[in-house]
């Protein structure tokens, strides 16, 4: 904690974002996060930089979207929300490639709530958090400037992903890479007006055929789900 706050002060930062990674997002490690936040805030309050008339240290925490088949907001997470300034939803990479689920969008606002095989959306996550006691004004909807792809025969949502190659990291599939490697100028663009999500369908697209530096990318791509101006605008209206 001392090292963290020393770095904050040295760089003139206004706060910290506590990325409590997925394998620590459980009922054993969660209460430790509560203790950590309390101690960070107590130590920061002793520093002149975070005493009146200055603003107290800003603390934020990112949380995953909820799978509505197993949705449960743990009490410790509600307590975390009461301590932090903002609870940011990591509202991206929300699809599935196994477990009986269907292919689903990268970052959908809404879902068909009667379909258990597409169990994630921003709206369902927000509603569960609020129902559990998280103040709506603290919830932040994230935007991921990247996407993910599936190989043929997948060409869109609501299809079978089992055994199908896919790619989904925020470097290879960053917006700039998607543009440079031809993904955003090839295929057929669709905006899913129910989910408020954008995607492109292809007939076996290969980025390596567009630019040499893209040669290591997936071959035979059938579907790309990603953020664009239209899906981001929809999120702005939702918020």
Image (cartoon, helix red, strand yellow):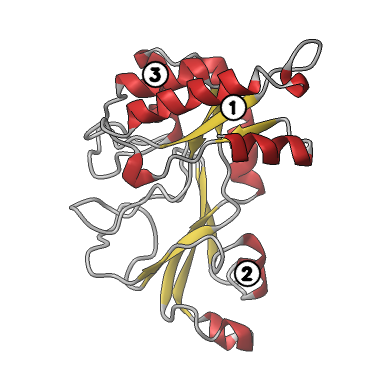
Q: Is residue 177 left or right of residue 223?
A: right
Quadrant including the N terminus: top right
Depth check: give the residue in front, 220 or 46. 46
Which residue is farthest left? 100
**Which one is earlier in the sequence, the residue at label 2 or at label 3?**
3
Query: Is residue 24 visible to us here?
Result: yes
Q: In the image, is residue 200 above or below residue 38?
A: below
- The quarter of the picture where residue 58 lies is top right
Residue 90 x %, y %:
48, 40
Q: Which residue: 77% across, 10% down?
A: 52
Quadrant including the C terminus: top right
Element class at badge 2: helix
**Which one is earlier in the sequence, the residue at label 1 or at label 2?**
1
Residue carrying label 1: 59
**Which one is earlier in the sequence, the residue at label 3 or at label 1?**
1
Residue carrying label 3: 78
Element class at badge 3: helix
Q: Residues within 10 Å of mark 1 (few under 14, many from 20)?
A: some
Residue carrying label 2: 177
Query: Is residue 85 visible to us here?
Result: no
Foreground disc of the pair 1, 2: 1
Residue 104 x %, y %:
36, 50
Q: Residues within 10 Å of mark 2 (few under 14, many from 20)?
A: some
Q: Which residue: 28% across, 70% down?
A: 164
Foreground disc of the pair 3, 1: 1
Give the CA separation, mark 1 to mark 2: 32 Å
Give the CA separation, mark 3 to mark 1: 15 Å
Q: In the image, is residue 233 above or below residue 101?
A: above
């Amino acid at each position: 904690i001392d090292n963290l706050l020393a770095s904050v002060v040295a760089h003139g930062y206004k706060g910290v974002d506590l990325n409590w990674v997925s394998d620590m997002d459980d009922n054993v490690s969660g209460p430790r996060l509560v203790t950590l936040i309390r101690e960070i805030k107590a130590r920061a309050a002793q520093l002149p930089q975070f005493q009146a008339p200055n603003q107290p240290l800003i603390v934020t925490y990112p949380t995953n979207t909820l799978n509505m088949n197993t949705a449960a907001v743990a009490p410790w997470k509600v307590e975390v929300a009461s301590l932090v300034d903002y609870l940011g939803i990591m509202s991206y990479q929300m699809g599935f490639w196994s477990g009986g689920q269907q292919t689903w969008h990268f970052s959908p606002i809404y879902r068909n709530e009667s379909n258990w095989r597409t169990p994630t959306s921003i709206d369902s996550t927000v509603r569960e958090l609020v129902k559990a006691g998280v103040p709506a004004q603290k919830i932040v909807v994230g935007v991921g400037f990247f996407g993910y792809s599936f190989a043929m025969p997948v060409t869109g949502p609501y299809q079978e992903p089992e055994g199908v190659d896919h790619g989904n990291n925020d470097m290879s599939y960053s917006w700039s890479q998607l543009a440079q490697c031809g993904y955003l100028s090839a295929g057929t663009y669709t905006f899913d007006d129910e989910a408020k999500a954008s995607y492109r369908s292809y007939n076996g697209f290969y980025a390596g055929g567009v630019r040499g530096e893209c040669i290591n990318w997936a071959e035979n791509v059938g579907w790309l789900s990603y953020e664009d101006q239209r899906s981001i605008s929809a999120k702005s209206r939702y918020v």
